[in-house]
Image (tube, helix red, strand yellow):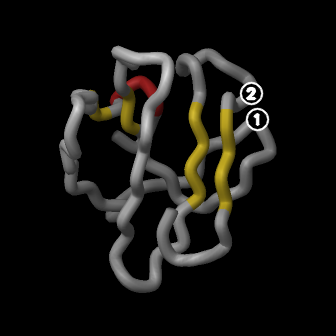
Amino acid sequence: NDDCSTAILLTPGSGCNPEQGTVSFSTTSTNPSGCSGANDVFYKFVANNSVATITVAPSNGLDVVLSIFGSCSSTSSIRCINSNTFGI
């Protein structure tokens, strides 16, 4: 899932549906939205409600930047969060 075209499908639900992931072997993609980050991985989901909660719980020492796009062809993100802390 190092590229948008190979994003891992997540299943939204009424409860928490955790998905373990890794940034091992990931590379930096060109991010046209200006949302800065380093190596990236991609996940995708189809919203089943007008509101979705996404929680990222990284391992120690990983500063996560979360960028949400409407599709792989989007040139700007719907939302970008860089908390500059370890966890979103």
Please identify the quadrant where the N terminus is shown. Answer: top left
| Residue occupying the point 76% across, 35% down | 32
Label 2 – label 1 distance at C-alpha = 6 Å
Along the viewing direction, whichever of 66 and 31 lies nearer the viewer: 66
Q: Mark 1 is on which residue type?
A: Pro
Q: Mark 2 is on which residue type?
A: Ser
Side of 64 where 77 appears, left or right: right
**Disc 2 packing (10 Å; few <14; some 14–19; many ≥20):** some
Q: Which residue is mark 1?
A: 32
Q: Secondary structure beneath disc 2?
A: loop
Circles 2 and 1, Cβ within 8 Å, touching? The answer is: yes
Q: Position of residue 39 (x, y in %)?
A: 53, 59
Q: Nearer the viewer, mark 2 or mark 1?
A: 2
**Disc 1 packing (10 Å; few <14; some 14–19; many ≥20):** few
Q: Earlier in the sequence, mark 2 or mark 1?
A: 1
Q: Which residue is mark 2?
A: 76
User: Taking 47 as reference, is 54 above or below it?
Assistant: below
